[in-house]
Image (cartoon, rainbow, N blue to C red):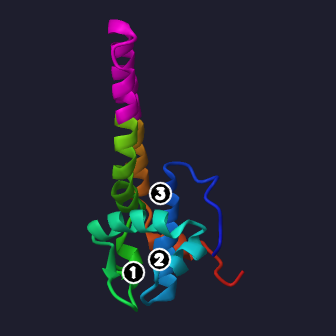
Amino acid sequence: MNTTNRSIPGPPRFGIAVHALVWLSQSGCVVSSAMMAGQVNSHATFLRRIMVHLVQAGMVEAKEGRDGGYFLRKSPADITLADVYMAVKSDCGTEQASVAADDEGGCGAAGQQLDSVLESIMGQAEQHTIDYLRQFTVDDVMRQVDFTA
């Protein structure tokens, strides 16, 4: 399942995280980050950063040592795409917050009001996205993919 994530909307981490979870589910065993990175078309270091969030969210477990790697802790039927999105989105917020902090003060009161309105709209859009993603599990995604192709 070597694919690119260019056309997947949302943070790049989300698409790679879903790919990793599907691949872990398909493998059914402990998989190293290097092996998994090749399958999800990502650099191993970037993938490990994503996997930290999936481990913290309780979806994946990391095994240390020579034969180490990652394996699923939860069933793919119990992992919603909203769970994945929420787990990996935490990395993106710090980048956006620092950009916003750099821009403050240059636009005056109207600029601050505009920022507030846009923040509210984007927050609502994200909530709708999360609500929609709750309808699908990793298992649902897997059922729509032909792994023999």
Q: Provide the residue designation for mark 2.
A: 33
Along the viewing direction, whichever of 70 and 28 lies nearer the viewer: 70
Q: Name the residue under label 1.
A: 70
Q: Do the residues labelled 2 and 1 touch (CB within 8 Å)?
A: yes
- Mark 3: secondary structure: helix
For marks 3 and 2, give the one nearer the viewer.
Answer: 2
Q: Is residue 136 visible?
A: yes
Q: Are marks 3 and 1 in contact (CB under 8 Å)?
A: no
Mark 3 closeness class: few <14, some 14–19, many ≥20 residues within 10 Å: many
Label 3 to label 1: alpha-carbon separation: 17 Å
Q: From the image, state whether disc 2 or disc 1 is nearer to you.
A: 2
For this rendering, which residue is in front, 34 or 71? 34
Q: Residue at x 39, y 68 (%)?
A: 51
Q: Main secondary structure of the magenta part?
A: helix
Alpha carbons under labels 2 and 1: distance apart:
7 Å
Is 63 colored magenta in this rendering?
A: no
Please name the amino acid that badge 2 sits on.
Ser
Q: Where is residue 6 in the image (x, y as percent from the top left)?
A: 64, 53
Q: Mark 3 = which residue?
A: 13
Quarter assignment of residue 145: bottom right
Given contact means CB atoms under 8 Å apart, are the residues at marks 3 and 2 in contact?
Answer: no
